[in-house]
Amino acid sequence: MSDYKGIFAQEDFVEPNDSCKKTFLVRLMHRKTKNISWTGTVEALTSKDAQAQWRKEYADIRPQYDHSYCLVISHLMH
């Protein structure tokens, strides 16, 4: 059973180098109305990294929205 768990533990492992970065589409969406208020892109290794990168690159956007908005992050296929 420990081998089985080990296979999945390594499934999301990504070697940290710039050639693995992907383009992610980041949208700010109102939770109730589902209206998109802002759209942009970031380069990152994973969607979690994309969220952190969005916070760095678009630091001026975040304070303009409250908790009624959420981030929607999707990988753009090339």
Image: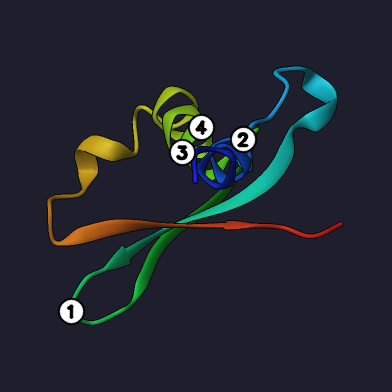
Residue at label 3?
48
- What separation in Å lies between label 1 and label 4 (alpha carbons)? 26 Å
Pointer 4 local density, CA inside 10 Å: few below 14, some 14–19, many at least 20? some
Pointer 2 local density, CA inside 10 Å: few below 14, some 14–19, many at least 20? few
Q: In the picture shown, does residue 65 fall above or below 13?
A: below
Identify the amino acid type marked 4.
Answer: Asp
Residue at label 2?
10
Q: Quadrant of residue 46?
A: top right
- What separation in Å lies between label 4 and label 2 (alpha carbons)? 18 Å
Query: Which type of secondary structure does the marked residue at label 2 adopt?
Result: loop
Identify the amino acid type marked 2.
Answer: Gln
First in sequence, mark 1 or 3: give its number.
1
Residue at label 1?
32
First in sequence, mark 1 or 4: give its number.
1
* Residue at image coords 70%, 18%: 16
Q: In the picture shown, does residue 70 fall above or below 2?
A: below
